[in-house]
Amino acid sequence: MRIGIAGTGRIGAYHAKTLTGVDAVSELVLADANAVAARDVATQLGVRAVDDVDALLDAGLDGLVIATPTTTHEALIRASVAAGIPTFCEKPVAASLEAALSLLEVEKASTVPIHIGFQRRFDVGYMRVQQAVEQGELGFIHTVRAMTLDTAPPPPEYVRASGGLFRDCSIHDFDIIRFVTNQEVRTAYAAGANKGADYIAEADDIDTGAGVFVLEDGTLVTFSATRHNAFGHDVRMEVLGSTGDLAVGLDDSLALTSAQEGVQFPPGPRVVNFMDRFLPAYQRELTAFTEVAAGKRPSPCTVFDGVQALRMAQACDLSRREGRVVQMTEIPQATQ
């Protein structure tokens, strides 16, 4: 199977390296707006690079992985689907909700599969909790807590194009909340603050955020995110039910220090970034995409899923700016 990768920055190069270990992939072809960067990554991995995305789309691909800046996602998804190439696109599905909704129409009108990249769906912990909720192991679910705490903020140029903390970072929590609970959100309330890098506030963004969702069945969900957690990358979820509970991310690498005397847990070592934390999940995710591209399974995370997570992010941003509870019916929506 010949897989193309558009974009060879941090996540694109990471995906390229991961795909070299996927059995179904016999050839990788890379392209980037910076052709030199694409050639450098290709040389490091012993794969092929082409001059630009147009050449990539003409390279006889069996599947395309889009790992370019968010602002380019819509155009590249459209071009790939138009060329009949099964498409994987990193989150978020598009730079705006309006663009994402337009891509939903593209998905509906085509038989070409589109897989949106939310790797937590392939993490063993989250998969276990989803199964437990689905099978009723925890009784009825009353509370969910989710968080993403990064060790350091991304560079200024990334922040300016990211769409904000909720669309760029918390969107992973938003997608996995839907995945684990199989529920949509009814209302959202969020707040944010800046206590660190000035360039984040200058980009009209926040470095720390938190909020509350009420799901359709009344389940209460809290979430939090920060760019400043230098003592460790901390991604967790706690799901509390009437007869049981489960937690994801509660292991030896947990970036918390107990104030209780004599407590040695967690012993470490701590992880410092999402790539270390989720490598096995990324491997499963990209393996799944090769199965989607081969027609062996449907997309496990569709454009509709990407739209719903983006709607949650938009509701949180609106709530933060206006200081009020937002009804999800206020946010543009679409049907599957």
Image: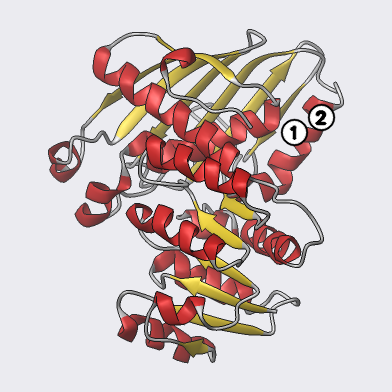
Q: Which amino acid, by three-letter code, is at mark 2? A: Ala
User: Does the image show residue 267?
Assistant: no
Which quadrant is the N terminus positioned in? bottom right
Q: Say which residue appears at 60% left-offset and 77% top-offset.
A: 61
Q: Which amino acid, by three-letter code, is at mark 1? A: Val
Front residue of 13/290: it is 290
Give the Cα distance between marks 2 and 1: 5 Å
How many dots with numbers? 2
Residue 237, image x, y percentages: 60, 32
Q: Say which residue appears at 34% left-offset and 37% top-offset.
A: 165
Query: Local crowd at mark 1 within 10 Å, few (<14), some, or many (≥20)?
Result: many
In the image, is residue 42 above or below residue 91? below
Q: Assess whether mark 1 and mark 2 are in contact (beta carbons under 8 angstroms).
A: yes
Residue 151, image x, y percentages: 38, 48
Q: Say which residue appears at 39% left-offset and 88% top-offset.
A: 39
- Quadrant in the rendering for residue 105: top right
In the image, is residue 289 above or below residue 115? below
For residue 84, the mark is none
Query: Local crowd at mark 2 within 10 Å, few (<14), some, or many (≥20)?
Result: some
- Residue at image mark 1: 129
Q: State the SS at label 1.
A: helix
In the image, is residue 239 above or below residue 256? above
Residue 58, image x, y percentages: 51, 81
Residue 54, image x, y percentages: 42, 77
